[in-house]
Image (spheres, rainbow, N blue to C red):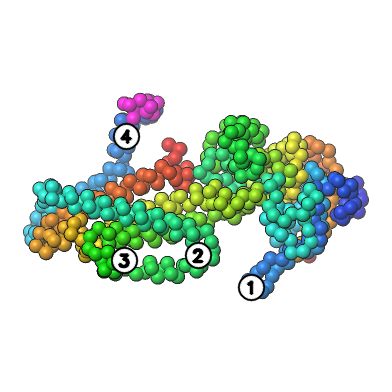
């Protein structure tokens, strides 16, 4: 399926230089216990590899286990069978190199925005033990990050004084403050209006280009996936599997205008038809 | 009708007052304005009106003192017998505060245990409801058997009374932590204790302080109930003595005093709640 637009890529590990692989999902199955003796299969024989610094988007019908995949990658959940490797070692408990952001920005309302952003530094080592000593340095870091996403004047406001878009910007800052090597985003812009969402795509692209974490973005929005990702994986309805993967060959930094080129629209269309086909529409 | 110019003057005056609010004069002016605000004046008027109507009804229908004394009568008794009443009031206040503190400490501890574990929550819930359903006055005779007549049964009754609202609220506050928030921290390797300290406890504070207001009122009820049954001093005991000698104005003076003390304690904790958990009420009056 090579047509110069999206290049279909094989998801099998070993296909690329082994040193380059950062996240390796191998034959993962995940069962959710429902009630006492019945269980649902959320993921079935899922394989996926991410290169170091790659931006991957996962799209698919709702309930296809996209979010479960993030929980597996972060170590919040263990697979029922198969293995998830991050940085070459199996994930058996929460790995601390992860930053997360969700559709719900989950800011703590009793802390000012800057203190919300600083929260991960109070949890994760080595920052945790240095937090008191380096407080000023860390605060400057947080202010810098907030300024980058356009929240310079809102650092000392409380979260409930911010709009939805601002909260999501702050949530991205919180996910990135400890410079995580793996950034997991679960529909972070799902609840925002179209224009705010497009602003935030650009903010996220800028942050990613500066810091180059490996990113897994779960989204329903195919244009979002095409705008942001290096590779888009399409997942099937439950139980989830990777149906197909597309490389997005649009140079960076991408602009919103790039989304209106034939390349991008054809790719969006193609992704759309995969999902429709899988849902039997 | 005001002209536009007049309105402009008015708004400018208000702005000037705001600008001055840093100075002492401005602050006094501000607090006076706040006191005179309709939402403060009308409740005060309602209280005054209540007693005025009471007074009038008693006078018009010539109600006998031993049935319903006039406010002027029991307020007079309250002032005249103040030296004798004061030790009773102090005793009741002391008992209430000690019982309240005890109840809140134990209640918060139990609430934390119950709220942190779904298992403990499920196991202890019926037991808690059972304890909650027992009329607390039924416990007083038992406490008297154990501890004799005096301050201790009253303190314990007050503590038992305010235990449950605190337990239920603290447990609810802890149990309803957003799972996503927990995920953000746990993915960073936060321990259960970290999550509790950074998220669970601060988040349950509004619930906790809301329960304190209720608990302090209930502690008063507990104290007075125990005092009427098993004490020689305290407002409750004073009222029982007064009623046995048909000193009805003194009984009403006791009720009035209890109401004043109860409102004062409630107000103190409402104020603390406002200060500590301002964020839970969101933008309402915080921005001002």
Query: Is tag 4's residue or tag 3's residue first in the polypeptide sequence?
Result: 4
Residue A147 figure quarter: top right
Considering the numbered disc 1 on the image, is that residue within a helix, a strand or a loop? loop
Give B69 or A254, whichever is nearer the viewer. B69
The answer to whether residue B79 of the structure is visible from this angle is yes
Residue at the location (32% across, 44% down)?
Answer: B39
Residue marked by disc 4: B31
Residue marked by disc 3: B136
> Of the residues tagged 4 and 3, which is closer to the observer?
3
Provide the major secondary structure of the magenta segment: helix
Considering the numbered disc 3 on the image, is that residue within a helix, a strand or a loop? helix
Considering the numbered disc 4 on the image, is that residue within a helix, a strand or a loop? helix
Cα distance, mark 4 to mark 3?
Answer: 42 Å
Query: Is tag 4's residue or tag 2's residue first in the polypeptide sequence?
Result: 4
Residue A194's tag is none
Mark 1, chain letter?
A
Pick out the residue farthest to the bottom: A37
Residue marked by disc 1: A36
Residue A74: percent from the left, percent from the top? 70, 52
């Amino acid at each position: 399926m090579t047509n110069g637009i999206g290049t279909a890529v094989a998801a099998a590990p070993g296909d690329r230089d082994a040193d380059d692989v950062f996240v390796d999902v191998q034959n993962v199955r995940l069962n959710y216990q429902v009630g006492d003796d019945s269980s649902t299969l959320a993921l079935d024989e899922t394989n996926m590899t991410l290169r170091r610094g790659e931006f991957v988007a996962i799209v698919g019908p709702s309930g296809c286990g996209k979010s479960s995949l993030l929980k597996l990658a972060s170590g919040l959940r263990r697979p029922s069978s198969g293995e998830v490797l991050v940085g070459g070692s199996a994930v058996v408990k929460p790995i601390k190199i992860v930053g997360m952001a969700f559709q719900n920005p989950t800011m703590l309302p009793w802390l000012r925005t800057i203190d919300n952003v600083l929260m991960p530094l109070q949890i994760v080592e080595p920052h945790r033990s240095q937090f008191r000593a380096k407080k000023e340095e860390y605060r400057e870091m947080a202010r810098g990050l907030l300024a980058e996403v356009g929240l310079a004047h809102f650092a000392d406001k409380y979260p409930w004084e911010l709009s939805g878009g601002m909260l999501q910007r702050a949530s991205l800052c919180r996910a990135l403050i400890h410079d995580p090597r793996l950034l997991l985003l679960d529909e972070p812009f799902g609840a925002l209006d179209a224009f705010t969402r497009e602003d935030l795509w650009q903010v996220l692209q800028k942050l990613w280009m500066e810091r180059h974490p490996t990113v897994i973005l779960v989204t329903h929005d195919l244009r979002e996936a095409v705008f942001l990702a290096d590779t888009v994986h399409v997942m099937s309805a439950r139980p989830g599997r990777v149906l197909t993967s597309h490389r997005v060959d649009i140079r960076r930094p991408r602009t919103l205008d790039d989304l209106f080129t034939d390349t991008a629209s054809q790719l969006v269309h193609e992704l759309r038809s995969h999902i429709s086909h899988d849902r039997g529409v | 009708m005001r002209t536009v110019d007049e309105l402009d003057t008015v708004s400018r005056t208000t702005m000037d007052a705001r600008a001055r609010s840093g100075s002492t004069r401005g602050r006094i002016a501000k607090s006076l304005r706040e006191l005179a605000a309709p939402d403060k004046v009308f409740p005060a008027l309602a209280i005054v009106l209540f007693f005025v109507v009471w007074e009038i009804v008693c006078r018009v229908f010539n109600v006998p003192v031993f049935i319903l004394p006039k406010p002027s009568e029991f307020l007079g008794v309250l002032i005249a017998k103040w030296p004798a009443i004061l030790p009773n009031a102090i005793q009741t206040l002391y008992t209430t505060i000690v019982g309240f503190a005890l109840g809140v400490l134990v209640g918060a501890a139990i609430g934390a245990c119950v709220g942190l574990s779904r298992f403990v929550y499920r196991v202890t819930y019926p037991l808690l409801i059972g304890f909650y359903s027992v009329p607390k006055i039924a416990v007083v005779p038992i406490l008297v058997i154990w501890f004799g007549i005096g301050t201790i049964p009253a303190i314990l009754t007050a503590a038992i009374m305010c235990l449950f609202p605190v337990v239920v609220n603290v447990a609810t506050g802890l149990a309803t932590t957003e799972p996503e928030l927990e995920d953000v921290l746990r993915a960073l390797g936060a321990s259960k204790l970290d999550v509790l300290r950074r998220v669970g406890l601060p988040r349950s504070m509004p619930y906790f302080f809301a329960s304190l207001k209720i608990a302090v009122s209930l502690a008063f009820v507990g104290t007075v109930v125990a005092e009427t049954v098993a004490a020689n001093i305290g407002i409750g005991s004073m009222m029982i003595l007064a009623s046995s000698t048909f000193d009805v104005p003194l009984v009403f003076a006791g009720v009035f005093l209890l109401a004043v003390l109860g409102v004062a304690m409630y107000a103190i904790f409402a104020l603390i709640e406002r200060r500590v958990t301002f964020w839970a009420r969101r933008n309402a009056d915080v921005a001002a």
